[in-house]
Amino acid sequence: MKLVSAREELESQGYRFVGRHTAVKLCHWLREGLQGNPGCYKQRFYGIDSHRCLQMTPTVVHCNQKCLFCWRSYENWTETKLTEHDPAKKLLGGVIKAQKQLLTGFGGSPEKYSQKLLEEARNPKHLAISLSGEPTLYPEINQLIEEAHKKQLTTFLVTNGQQPETIKNLTPPTQLYISLDAPNKKTYNQLCRPTKKNGWQNLQKTLKTLPKHNGRTAIRITLVNGYNDQKHNQYAEILREAQPDYIEIKAYMHVGQSRKRLNRQRMPTNQQVKKFSEQIADKTDYTLTDHVPESRVTLLTKDKTPKINNK
């Protein structure tokens, strides 16, 4: 799908475009934070301020997987390479400006939104590179991370692991997330639907780089009933080798466009997520250290504190 044909649909969903292939969107938890309510589970797990998080993507309609559980409308996305791209420095300045523009309307409701927190939100501290698409397809992903760090922003990069060479040579973000949504090739092809035949092999290559990665690492598992929810033994074997600093296990949520691909019964309960997490902990050297029932997500750690320093 060409960006110009997707733009109207995405803008109606709250996206703000920057340049040719980048977008920003205010997170639900940012809005909650501005009202003084609890933030997202990352605030609880890692200590970030949800109201100061900038959620963006440098590849808004470019992805090399078609995951069944994805809430995005990707059916007509055909691009997996950026033939032209905007420079990282310009891009970062643009997304910060766009975030401020999106926050403008909140100033008119002082009875609902804290003006002190709103002023803080206009100066983000955290860059979540994860909104849509696959960010490692952006040729200047290293420069983007570097520019963010120059501005004292922490960076959370979420990738599907399909670009092992890029990840091997990646400028370490504050935290690197690898999505591991299947523990074997058959399940991976059924659930994640890569655009290339060697998708599973690419993911395995990426996982092998984690023990040597010079930065914080996390593996995130999206649990989907009937696909990967009974495969804790296979997951444990992979996790023991990959040795991420943290493991997040989160329920598939029956929202957005995923409702056209999966029925509601595919969404695990909070109890199912916790049980699966306990099974993983029993078979690895990780401990189930936190749990946010509202988001149906758990955190498993070893001996490294999950809190980031930039508070």
Image (tube, grey):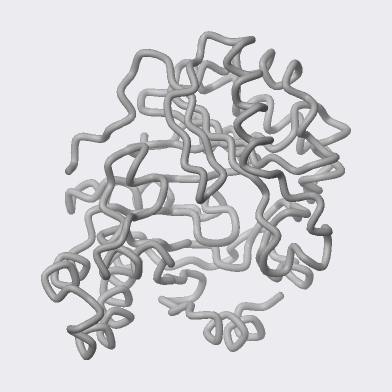
Which quarter of the rendered picture does the N terminus lie within?
Answer: bottom right
Could you say where residue 68 lies in the image, as x and y percent from the top left?
Answer: 78, 54
Is 107 on the left-hand or right-hand side of 215?
Answer: left
Residue plotted at (66% across, 16% down): 236
Q: Is residue 95 above or below residue 101?
A: above
Residue plotted at (74% across, 52% down): 67
Which quarter of the rendered picture does the C terminus lie within?
Answer: top left
Residue plotted at (53% across, 68% down): 84
Could you say where residue 252 lies in the image, as x and y percent from the top left?
Answer: 67, 49
Residue plotted at (63% across, 62% down): 62
User: Picture quarter containing residue 50?
Assistant: bottom left
How many marks are shown on the rendered structure?
A: 0
**View extreme (front): residue:** 271
Is 285 on the left-hand or right-hand side of 92?
Answer: right
Q: Is residue 2 above or below residue 161?
A: below
Is 234 on the left-hand or right-hand side of 52?
Answer: right
Could you say where residue 224 lies in the image, as x and y percent from the top left?
Answer: 75, 43
Q: Nearer the viewer, residue 202 or 240?
A: 240
Q: Is residue 255 above or below residue 204?
A: below
Q: Nearer the viewer, residue 252 or 145?
A: 252
